[in-house]
Image: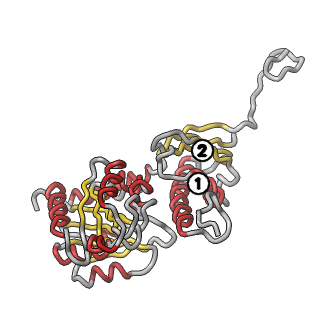
Amino acid sequence: MCATCGCGEPEHSHAHSHEPETIDLEQRVLAKNDHLAGHNRQWLADRSVLAINLMSSPGSGKTTLLERTARALPVHVIEGDQETLFDAERIQATGRPAVQINTGAGCHLDASMVADALRRLDPPAGGVVLIENVGNLVCPALFDLGEHARVVITSVTEGADKPLKYPHMFRTADLVLLNKIDLLPYVDFDTHRFTDAVHTVNPAASIHQTSATRGDGIDGWLDWLHAQHEVASPVH
Amino acid sequence: MDPRPEPGRRTGAPGPRQELIAVHEMAITQSIVEAVIEKIPDRKVVGVRLVIGADAGVVADSVRFCFELITEDTNLAGAELVIDEPPGHDLRIKSVSVERS
């Protein structure tokens, strides 16, 4: 009897040609983005250009912080939004170059978009590029852009437990800026709870308080940028 | 009205959070489908096995929804999607099943 199909015939071959063939791929889903991010990193290194990826929820004050930064330092800016040129225009009004990326339905910047924007922006050797990601605490965390460091901006009008609610975003941050601290007297925001929450998901993250509108803490933020720049661009 | 978001809701107007998650997984699923087509351009793919770690930042259920939309009119149309969800950050296409030629 055939042991495979149980028929009365002697043992015979069963070529199951109708059964699908399984092919092992073992491929990381973000491999392509990571590969392109590697190219961006090399492109930046070849020019000794520092690139910082700034991420936050909408309305945390990213663009206001960038306007203030652009008035203090000769930065180049990449603005990511789903629609409009508003943010790039705000940066350009400070006299600094800015390129807008509109992602349409997309909720994050990816390495390919940034590659294109870097070439359009054409920063000089030794320059600083600030990349304002799409306002969203979920999606941008997954996409490496080729940046040197990641900054997450939160404002005191948001909940102090945001780092626990959006751990992916805070886990990858090198620096967390707590913005709008001029509003602290008017809102129920516990800065100690916030600090604890950040360090729960990311013990290594630095936290720095700012008010982009009033100017508090801006010197500390610029010092941090200078320190990053010295690492990325030691000769400039 | 219940203010809580309905998990896994797929019909009707998306809430703001729902919309963000949907587009995010859309991009991820798009890269999965593109990667499979790049490897297997000309054979009928009948199954795809993914690993989406619990801490990968990707919602498996949203990927299932996007997968069906994105694979329409490709050689992956109708393919069965199996997702393993172990602990950790792994985000990987494990294997595909293709019809024998």
Specify the label residue B63 is tagged with: 1
Residue A70 sits in which quadrant?
bottom left
User: For numbered disc 2, what is the local secondary structure?
Assistant: strand
Please tell me the numbered disc located at residue B83. Answer: 2
Q: Viewer-proximal residue, A71 or A209?
A: A209
Task: Answer whether labels 1 and 2 touch (C-beta < 8 Å).
Answer: yes
- Specify few, some or many for label 2: CA neighbours under 10 Å numbering under 14, 14-19, or 20 or more: some
Q: Which mark is residue A73?
A: none
Residue at image position (62%, 61%) is: B6
Q: Residue A232 or A192: which is nearer the viewer? A: A192
Whole-Å distance between the Cαs marked 1 and 2? 9 Å
> What is the chain identity of the residue bearing mark 2?
B
Quadrant the N terminus of chain B occupies: bottom right
Q: Percent x, y for residue A209?
A: 24, 64
Query: A17 left or right of A123?
Result: right
Q: Is residue A109 above or below residue B76?
A: below
The image quadrant of residue A116 is: bottom left
Residue at 36% from the left image edge and 49% from the top image edge? A201
Q: Quadrant of the C terminus of chain B?
A: top right
What's the amino acid at mark 2? Ile
Q: How many tags in the picture?
A: 2
* Residue sticking out furthest to the bottom: A93
**The image quarter in which residue A156 lies:** bottom left
- The answer, for residue A33, to whether it is visible in the render is no
Determine whether A105 is above or below A19 in the image. Answer: below
Q: Residue at x 59, y 38 (%)?
A: A23
Where is residue B75 shown, x and y percent of the image? Answer: 65, 53
Q: Is residue A234 left or right of residue B89?
A: left
**Chain to which mark 1 belongs:** B
Tell me how the rendering is colored: secondary structure
Q: Nearer the viewer, residue A205 or A104?
A: A205
Going by the numbered disc 1, the residue's amino acid type is Val
